[in-house]
Image (spheres, rainbow, N blue to C red):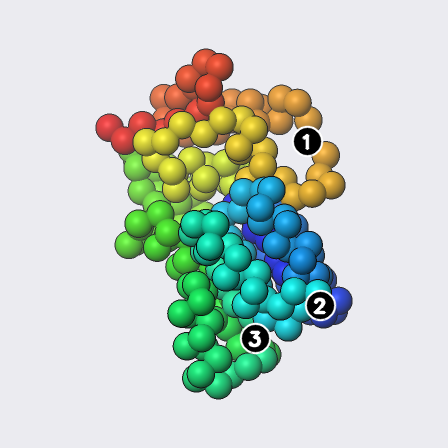
Amino acid sequence: MRLLLVEDDAILGDGLKAGLTLEGYAVDWLTDGAQADEALKLNHYDLVVLDLNLPRLDGMSVLKNLRKRKDNTPVLVLTARDGVSERVAGLDGGADDFVCKPFDLTEVCARLRALARRHEGQGSPLLEHKGVTLDPAAHQVFYQGAAVDLSQKEYEILNYLMTHIGHVTSRARLEEALYAWGSEVESNAVEVHIHHLRKKLDPGLIRTIRGVGYIIDQA
């Protein structure tokens, strides 16, 4: 999933970007509230991790502008403000969850997975369909009960398509979701990864709709 990280502390932001990238997120990192506001207008993100104390435009203003545009992208707020009034104001302003600094990266990742599940209307932490079980917390995939070894990008594509079962996803949208700014993307990268997934799993699991994109059918 593509994630926007907005944090002006260089050390914290660098550590978060590295940790979230290892978790499989395509992370775009900005340190400026005004830049973040513009990026959210121009790009689609699956999740946002947002600090409140930002230069030029504070995090609450970024959040309120996002919601004014009727954008329901899940937002996890990082804050040093641990008072109840600040959390209430943030939640009423459109935040989906809060983590107070200092925090543990494993907690941030768990909260992001929970936000993604709720956003997609999924109650179970496991994604299960047609004999495939995907465990986002453990980054494991099983087919017919047997563990399947996937590359990072294969896993990310499968995770994205299983999160959006019944919806067609274009190649461009998959590339947008899987690659952060500055990442080099080969023209046939998505096709190659899907070809490998079909060999490792049920060949009919991922269906190509020519000229449109890819889908995992509900039935």
What whole-number distance in Å separates the C-alpha atoms at marks 3 and 2?
A: 14 Å
**Quadrant containing the C terminus in the rendered view:** top left
Q: Which element type, helix, strand or loop, lies under badge 2?
A: loop
Disc number lying in front (3 or 2): 2
Q: Which residue is mark 3?
A: 79
Q: For the residue carrying disc 3, how many other residues have a C-alpha within 10 Å: few (<14), some (14-19), or many (20+)?
A: some
Q: Position of residue 186 (x, y in %)?
A: 68, 26
Q: Which residue is mark 2?
A: 55
Q: Which element type, helix, strand or loop, lies under badge 1?
A: loop
Sequence-wise first label, 3 or 2: 2
Residue 185 badge: 1
Q: Position of residue 41 (x, y in %)?
A: 58, 46
Q: Position of residue 171 (x, y in %)?
A: 53, 26
Horizontally, residue 130 falls left or right of residue 168, namely left
Tell whether label 1 touches label 3 (CB within 8 Å): no
- Identify which residue is drawn at 27% across, 31% down: 218
The kind of residue tagged 2 is Pro
Which residue extends farthest left? 219
- Residue 30 vs 77, above or below: the answer is above
Q: Nearer the viewer, residue 77 or 111?
A: 77
